[in-house]
Image (cartoon, rainbow, N blue to C red):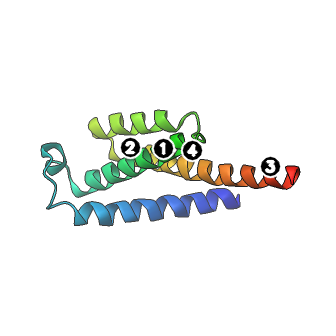
Amino acid sequence: MKFKKYAKYLGVATLAIGIVTGCANAGSSSSASTASMSANDQAVQQVIDDAKAALSIAKKGDYAWRDTGKFIKQAEKALADGHTAKASSLATKALQQSQLAKKQSIEQAKAVEARFN
């Protein structure tokens, strides 16, 4: 129950950061597709971009979770289809999974170290 509570707060915080970042970059974007997006869509796109970056780092560290990439693709499709809320939810889920995967890898490394030392 606590995990769901904190996951919601993390999702809201991530979306808020995305909105602030998206709004800050709204005037400086040179991409035609980004320029035609609303501020909310730009914020969701920023969360998708953050999720992609986190997934890339997770893949390099060999601790990426199975469905994270699928959530990113679904979020991109939902955003393209105009389903901003669904895209936001999926992108946030993907970002959270990448962050949790990193945390899991750290905890597993500690457990292995404790067992074999």
| Spot occupied by residue 63 in the image (x, y as percentages of width and height) | 60, 42
Q: Report the disc number at residue 114.
A: none
Residue named by callout 3: 112
Q: Position of residue 75 (x, y in %)?
A: 39, 39
Near mark 2 (Cα within 10 A), the count class, few <14, some 14-19 or many ≥20, is many
Q: Amino acid at mark 4?
A: Gly
Q: Is residue 50 above or below residue 80?
A: below
**SS of the residue under disc 1:** helix
Mark closer to the observer (1, 3):
3
Q: Residue at image x 26%, y 53%?
A: 42
As helix, strand or loop, the secondary structure at mark 2 comes to helix
Q: Secondary structure at mark 3?
A: helix
Quadrant of res 29: bottom left
Q: CA–CA distance between discs 3 and 2?
A: 37 Å
Mark closest to the chain's N terminus, 4 or 1: 1
Q: Could you give the CA–CA distance between mark 1 and mark 2, rounded to whole angstroms?
A: 17 Å
Cα–Cα gap, marks 1 and 3: 24 Å
Counting residues from the start of the chain, the first of labels 4 and 3 encountered is: 4
- Please name the residue that numbered disc 4 is placed on: 61
Residue 21 picture location, percent across and down: 30, 63
Q: Earlier in the sequence, mark 3 or mark 2?
A: 2
Q: In the drawing, what numbered circle is on residue 87?
A: 2
Checking the image for residue 55, the label placed there is: 1
The amino acid pointed to by label 2 is Ala
